[in-house]
Image (spheres, grey):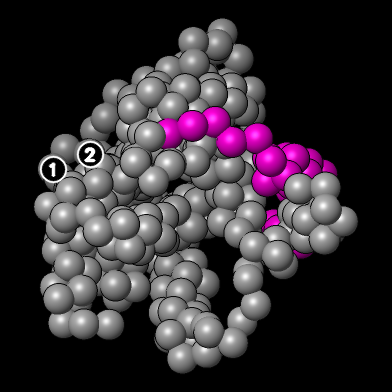
Amino acid sequence: MSVFVFAGAAQFAAVGYVTQGLGWPSIVLLTAFLNARHLLYGAALAPWVVGRPRSLRALMAYVLTDEAFALGLRHFRTVGRLDLVGYWIAAFAVVWIPWNLSTLAGVLIGGAVPDPTRLGLDVVFPAAMAGMAVGLATGRREVTAAIAGAGIAVGAALAAGPPAGIVAGGLLGPLAGLALPGRERDEAAEEAAVQQGDEDHLIGGAP
Amino acid sequence: MSLDLVLLAVLMGAVTYPSRAVPLLAPGMGRLPPVVLLYLRLVGPAVLMAVAAVNVLVTVGPGGEPSLHIGIEAPAVVAAIIVVAWRRNLFLGLMVAVLTTAIARGAGLA
């Protein structure tokens, strides 16, 4: 599952669904819904990969996770261009390889590990998500979007379930950030110029 | 793991991949209006924080009904946020969150 799905939240959820005896169609549907947030990640990364070969973009999509997105996008913004080496390091070296090795270790020796919740390890996932959000929150708009996204997500999750909450928070949270007065509009326009106007710069030229 | 579950994993992967690939492979993504680019710039913090908030504040009961969960996890994640914002160090933030949770549970506070 770690190879084919490669999406931690969906995998954890699926294990719970299977042990509860939920039918396959429901599990697959819930997986699709929970992972729908990747549409947003892909859309946010898309302007950076314009002009790249389709096969390369297809491979980038396979390893597009929460972590790869957050680390990769932050790196692109830092260097001002698409940096494939940086993306592969974030996606493969930091996430894909450790995730699959850890999965294998869990299968082989997981039974010998004491209850992870006693050790507080269950908070690693949400703390990592929140910490990576902090890394992307470079201004008032981002902070507002993050806070609004969290609030909307919890409200929607209580009403319609966690997958719906995450998608609602991800879709509607940014609107709260957009509603702020435009002190940072120049910065956004500058980033848009980097992504759109200077294609040589974007497609891999020297910074 | 039985072969049946392998097939389930393949099906889960088959419905996951399109959500990752479609925006990256779709034509026209290089000429988005500035307001859309600004919106997309805000998507990351919003989605990641949404995932974190739902993970620590919402639990799903055996019947599938969601309910609000107030525990040590939320303060631990807030502590991680503060540390990451202060020290710009994700690993340190994770350590603080884990230690906060483990100590609180070990002391019977959570």
Residue located beneath label 1 in the image: B27
Q: Nearer the viewer, residue A91 or A122?
A: A122
Q: Residue at x 33, y 63 (%)?
A: A19
Q: Count the marks: how many?
A: 2
How many neighbours does mark 1 have within 10 angstroms: few (below 14), some (14-19), or many (20 or more)? few
Residue B93, by quadrant, is bottom right
- Residue A96: image x %, image y %? 42, 74
Residues marked 1 and 2 touching at CB (< 8 Å): yes
| Direction from residue A51 to residue A201 in the image, left or right | right
Residue A84, disc: none
Q: Is residue A82 visible?
A: no
Mark 2 belongs to which amino acid? Met
Mark 1 belongs to which amino acid? Pro
Residue A9, by quadrant, is bottom left
Q: Is residue A63 above or below residue B18?
A: below
| Direction from residue A22 to residue A188 in the image, left or right | right
Q: Residue at x 33, y 27 (%)?
A: A160
| Direction from residue A92 to residue A118 in the image, left or right | right
Q: Nearer the viewer, residue A158 or A78?
A: A158
Q: Could you tell me what secondary structure mostly forms the magenta stretch?
A: helix
Distance CA(mark 1)–CA(mark 2) = 6 Å
Q: Residue at x 70, y 65 (%)?
A: A118
User: From this viewpoint, which residue is outermost toward the right?
Assistant: B107
- Residue A60: image x %, image y %? 30, 63
Residue located beneath label 2 in the image: B29
What's drawn in magenta, residue-wise?
B66-95
Q: Is residue B42 magenta?
A: no
User: From this viewpoint, which residue is outermost toward the bottom?
Assistant: A108
Q: Is residue A27 above or below residue B91?
A: above
Quarter in which the N terminus of chain B is drawn: bottom left
Q: Is residue B89 magenta?
A: yes
